[in-house]
């Protein structure tokens, strides 16, 4: 068997990277959910009954996690608890991961989603990052 050339090795690594990180942002994920990330922040359009999956890079070993403030009159309902998925290289001490938040569009309207990346015990400190989405449900 011939060893892989540099181009094939690079392609194999790229395939493994995409597989390890789930779907590409903005595409359909598990169960047909619309997937958004920090890089795709902004406006999102959904139909009533559709699922939205928010995937945010995080590293719980630093004490930071994402915090979400629920809306007063939501058009999205949170589905279950937040899941933390370590990256495949998670065997490395201090390796990060992804927090996965799932929501279901329950009625027509518009809702802002704001996530703050912070340490819960640092009251009064500004968040390290803020990610905002505006979701329109039709």
Image (spheres, rainbow, N blue to C red):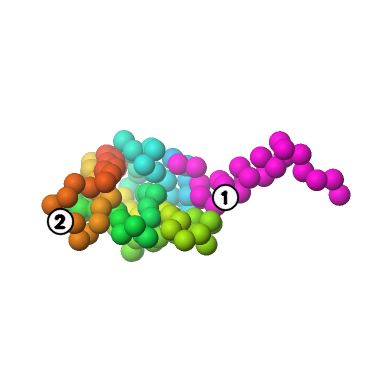
Q: Residues within 10 Å of mark 1 (few under 14, many from 20)?
A: few
Q: Secondary structure at mark 2?
A: loop
The image shows residue 104, relative to residue 6, as above or below, that is below
As for residue 121 lying within the magenta part, the answer is: no
Tell me where the magenta segment starts and ends, as one range: 1-25
Which residue is at the front of the view, 54 or 97? Answer: 97
Where residue 135 appears, as percent x and y from the top left, is 29, 41
State which quarter of the image contains the C terminus: top left
Q: Residues within 10 Å of mark 2 (few under 14, many from 20)?
A: few
Please tell me the numbered disc located at residue 80.
none
The answer to which image quadrant residue 63 occupies is bottom left
Q: Which residue is mark 1?
A: 19
As for residue 12 lying within the magenta part, the answer is: yes
The answer to which image quadrant residue 12 occupies is top right
Which residue is at the front of the view, 84 or 4? Answer: 4
Type of secondary structure dominating the magenta stretch: helix
Q: Residue at x 56, y 46 (%)?
A: 18
| Mark positioned earlier in the residue sequence (1 or 2) | 1
Q: Which residue is mark 2?
A: 123
The image shows residue 124, relative to residue 8, as above or below, that is below
């Amino acid at each position: 068997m011939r060893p892989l050339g540099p181009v094939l090795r690079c392609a194999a690594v790229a395939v493994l990277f995409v597989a390890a990180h789930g779907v590409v942002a903005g595409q359909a994920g598990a169960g047909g959910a619309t997937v958004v990330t920090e890089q795709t922040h902004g406006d999102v359009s959904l139909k009533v009954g559709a699922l939205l999956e928010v995937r945010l890079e995080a590293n719980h070993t630093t004490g930071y996690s994402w915090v979400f403030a629920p809306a007063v009159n939501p058009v999205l309902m949170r589905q279950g608890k937040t899941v933390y998925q370590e990256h495949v290289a998670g065997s490395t001490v201090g390796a990060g991961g992804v927090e996965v938040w799932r929501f279901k569009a329950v009625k027509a309207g518009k809702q802002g989603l704001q996530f703050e990346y912070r340490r819960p015990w640092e009251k009064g400190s500004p968040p390290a990052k803020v990610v905002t989405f505006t979701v329109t449900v039709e």
